[in-house]
Amino acid sequence: MSDSSDATFDPSRRRFLQGSGGALLAMGAVGPAMAQSAGDAGTQGAALSSAELGGETFELGNGTQPPEEVSAVSPSARGRPMPEIEQRYPVEPKRRLGWAVVGLGDFALNQILPAFGESEHSRLVALVSGDRDKAQQVASRYGVDEENLYDYDNYDSMADNDEIDIVFIILPVNMHAEYTIRAAKAGKHVLCEKPMAMDEQECQAMIDACRENDRQLMIAYREQYEPHNLEAIRQIQDGALGELRLMTLNAGSPVDPEEPRGQWRLRKEMAGGGSLYDIGIYALQAARYLSGEEPIEVSAMISSPEDDPRFAEVEDSVTFQLRFPSGLLATCTSSFTTAQHNMASVFGTDGTLTLEPMSDYYQHELRILTDEGEKSLDIQEISQFAAEMDHLSQVVREGGSPKTPGEEGMQDIHLMRAIYASATSGRPVRIESDYRRSAEELVRTSDDHGG
């Protein structure tokens, strides 16, 4: 279409033509019949015009007495009784906890900030960014007072802002410890993105700082608040698969060094590791919470393309096997060069469970296959980001402890460093850890604050 007027596309007109084209053709075919029918109307009585129907009243009922509840309803515009609330009901704004989001990158802008619109116990009140212009632009869209915009130099002055109850640390891994500790000293509770920190020493320092300042520390393991993952845990605990024997858990996502979110992930001093730290942690996490056990031994291998400059500092593909006390074996993989994939399969003596995706943001599917056939469980999707934030808000407001505390994050760091040790040495590594969680703790939801 070279003529600019012809190139203008009106979608509403097209929808009309698509919907009416067949009807117009059909009208052409039945038109004569309709005309004949109209002509025959004279034998049944004269046709009425719309003008003649002005004040006509039509009796539509059957003449019986309506129920008292119906007859009592006034036809005037007056207040009606409160209906039964079928949707989840948010708490009053003044009781919602105030949150500051630290770091305005891709994940924060596209996932976390929009999730406040679905939160029931949390509200966005402050932003922290090194880019003032970006912070002001975001604040204008989310109704954040410009007085509540901070940078990394005046971060500690949040101590004087009573609107802020919790800070959400969404920064590269090497900054998690510093900004968690500073937040705790400023009197703020902390939700920190995974992986928790660069090493176990930093994890312990974060835990100690929050404990010393009587602040809650939670790690943002969103999939532990996601309904499909929670139902998978319940099905396994209820014996739907019998005794567990094997698990396979895989996570792959290409990393692009031209994108800001991919750049720091390829710097070891910022990310701590490569695909294992970034996405392999989801496979490790799922193996732990689906099994309900903690591994006692790991074996691992690492492979990176020799001619790919992306992997000058961090690893590409990792495969690792976990041995659990019950004898269960879990095979896990992660990669920065495979096509996108994300899946968990659990094999038991009586059935198989498949969760796909395992840890993506949306559109999960949970299937169980037994001798009785395959069934796909119908589970309502929710915002896992809103769920994890609301969980911490409830813990802070009502007491108790978070489902995924700092100790949970430190356990993953401990295990991932053992995986690296195995891959480097070429030998299995025995795990020494006393960390345990109960079956009840694993199925806690975002509504359970543990008080």
Image (cartoon, helix red, strand yellow):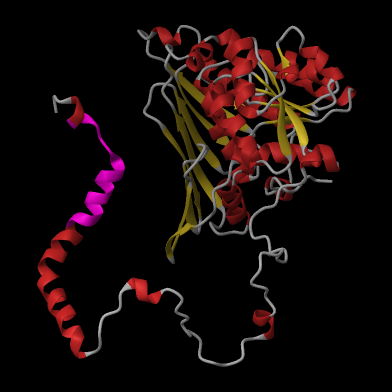
Residue 428 visible from this viewpoint: no
Frontmost residue, 145 versus 253: 145
Frontmost residue, 60 versus 157: 60
Q: Is residue 266 magenta?
A: no
Q: Is residue 7 magenta?
A: yes
Residue at figure coordinates x 48%, y 85% from the top left: 59
**Quadrant of res 184:** top right
Q: Is residue 131 left or right of residue 10?
A: right
Q: Is residue 97 left or right of residue 8?
A: right
User: Relative to residue 142, is residue 329 depicted above or below?
Assistant: below
Frontmost residue, 115 versus 135: 135
**Quadrant of res 239:** bottom right
Residue at figure coordinates x 42%, y 16% from the top left: 256
Residues drawn in magenta:
6-21
Residue at figure coordinates x 35%, y 7% from the top left: 307
**Quadrant of res 427:** top right
Q: Quadrant of the image for the N terminus?
A: top left
Relative image position of residue 158 (x, y in whole percent):
81, 18
Relative image position of residue 8 (x, y in whole percent):
24, 31
Frontmost residue, 250 versus 104: 104
Relative image position of residue 392 (x, y in whole percent):
75, 37
Residue at figure coordinates x 16%, y 84% from the top left: 40
Q: Main secondary structure of the magenta part?
A: helix
Relative image position of residue 284 (x, y in whole percent):
57, 33
Q: Is residue 27 left or right of residue 235?
A: left
User: Relative to residue 117, is residue 125 depicted above or below?
Assistant: above
User: Relative to residue 443, is residue 252 depicted above or below?
Assistant: above
Residue 364 visible from this viewpoint: yes
User: Relative to residue 137, is residue 165 depicted above or below?
Assistant: below
